[in-house]
Image: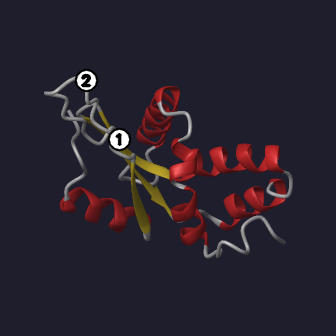
Amino acid sequence: MFAPFDNDTLASLESAHGEIRVVRGEKPPAKRWRPDDMPETPWEAVFRKPTVGECDNFEGAAHQDKARAAALRNLAKATVVGVSRAGKQVLHVEPGDARSKQAVRDAWDALRNDYSGAHMAAQKHLMSLAGMSDEEEGKE
């Protein structure tokens, strides 16, 4: 059961963290051999704008393909502030709350165990939040 973030929740996250982006996993196609199959969106995540240090870490590792993939995974994990999956939402609303921050990161890790490319779905949004265009990603 998918539970998207409502507008009040998104407004709370934006108020707490500044600029945010919502990324939604793509709904899988229906299985034609199952006539009652009604797939739904599997997940949704909210990311905040990265700090200068988080961007520097990404840029420093983004020049080689293998390092770039790891840097993108790290940037996504560092900036995730909300995860909705299987009807459960985990939020990090208070920036100083280390426990909720860790809970959201743990939820992100659990999501990636099932959807290992989720960070790739967030790439364009993360680059936009960082102020990078597609041509600038990973360049110094």
Residue nearest the observer in this picture, 87 or 120: 120
Label 1: element kind: strand
Q: Nearer the viewer, mark 1 or mark 2?
A: 2
At 43% from the left and 45% from the top, the residue drawn is 97
The local crowd at label 2, few if under 14, some if 14 to 19, many if 20 or more residues have their Cα within 10 Å, is few
Q: x and y percent of residue 74 in the render?
A: 65, 45
Quick one: label 1 or label 2, which is nearer the N terminus? 2
At 48% from the left and 33% from the top, the residue drawn is 115
Q: x and y percent of residue 21 in the render?
A: 42, 63
Q: Answer with left or right where residue 37 lies relative to residue 27.
A: left
53 relative to 27, above or below: below
Q: x and y percent of residue 59 in the render?
A: 78, 62
Q: Amino acid at mark 2?
A: Trp
Q: Quadrant of the N terminus?
A: top left
Q: Answer with left or right where residue 8 lies relative to residue 68.
A: left
The local crowd at label 1, few if under 14, some if 14 to 19, many if 20 or more residues have their Cα within 10 Å, is many
Q: Answer with left or right where residue 29 lies relative to residue 63.
A: left
Spatial separation of the CA atoms under disc 1 and disc 2: 24 Å
Occupied quadrant, residue 40: top left
Label 2: element kind: loop
Question: What residue sits right under mark 2 in the picture?
Answer: 33
In the displayed orientation, state which residue is furthest to the front.
33
Question: What residue sits right under mark 1 in the picture?
Answer: 43
Q: Amino acid at mark 1?
A: Trp
At 37% from the left and 63% from the top, the residue drawn is 16
In the displayed orientation, state which residue is furthest to the left.
36
Q: Which mark is residue 8?
A: none
Q: x and y percent of residue 102 in the render?
A: 49, 36
At 82% from the left and 53% from the top, the residue drawn is 61
Residue nearest the observer in this picture, 77 or 85: 85
